[in-house]
Amino acid sequence: QVQLVESGGGLVQAGGSLRLSCAASGNIFSINIMGWYREAPGKERELVAAITSGGTTNYADSVKGRFTISRDNAKNTVYLQMNSLKPEDTAVYHCATNVEVDSGWYDYWGQGTQVTVSS
């Protein structure tokens, strides 16, 4: 009913930048919070950043000052600009949203995009 399509992952050297995008499509009435999580091998899933429909943002301490989350409400799209990347940022990044459809509010997840930072 709702699909999230992520793009923008890849391989980058330490100190480099990447920009992730996640577009939501389907029978969407409205979207509340949009966010990015990441999963690294052997580690628990971690919230990286989140943004409300009004633009309030929240970041993990490990990415503050380096990552910026933004969204385009007209396009139902959330972005994650990642600068000064470090090897420890290597993970699969998933976007997640809280979406209102005709039957109520539900959480949806993207399939994930790999980010690899080489030292």
Image: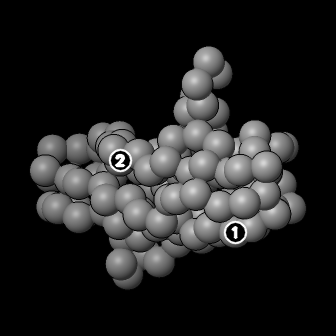
- Residue 22, image quadrant: bottom left
Q: Amino acid at mark 2?
A: Gly
Q: Residues within 10 Å of mark 2 (few under 14, many from 20)?
A: some
Secondary-structure class at tag 2: loop
- Residue pushed farthest front? 119
Residue at the limit of the structure toward the bottom, as seen here: 74
**Residue 40 tag number:** none
Q: 56 left or right of 100?
A: right
Using residue 92 as the reference point, say whether residue 4 is left or right of it. Answer: left
Q: Nearer the viewer, residue 109 or 7?
A: 7
Instruction: Tell me the residue that label 2 is attached to.
Output: 110
Reading the image, the residue beneath label 1 is 17
Q: Give the x, y percent position of residue 23.
A: 35, 66
The x and y percentages for residue 92 are 51, 41
| Neighbour tally class for label 1: few under 14, some 14-19, many 20 plus, Cα within 10 Å | some
- Amino acid found under the numbered disc labelled 1: Ser
Determine which quarter of the picture holds residue 82. Answer: bottom right
Residue at (37% x, 81% y) in the render: 74
Q: Can residue 53 be seen at all in this image of the molecule?
A: no
What is the distance, in whole Å, between disc 1 and disc 2 at their CAs?
21 Å
Residue visible at 62% across and 18% down? 42
Q: Given contact means CB atoms under 8 Å apart, are the residues at marks 1 and 2 in contact?
A: no
**Quarter of the rendering containing residue 90:** top right
Residue 74 vs residue 37: left or right?
left
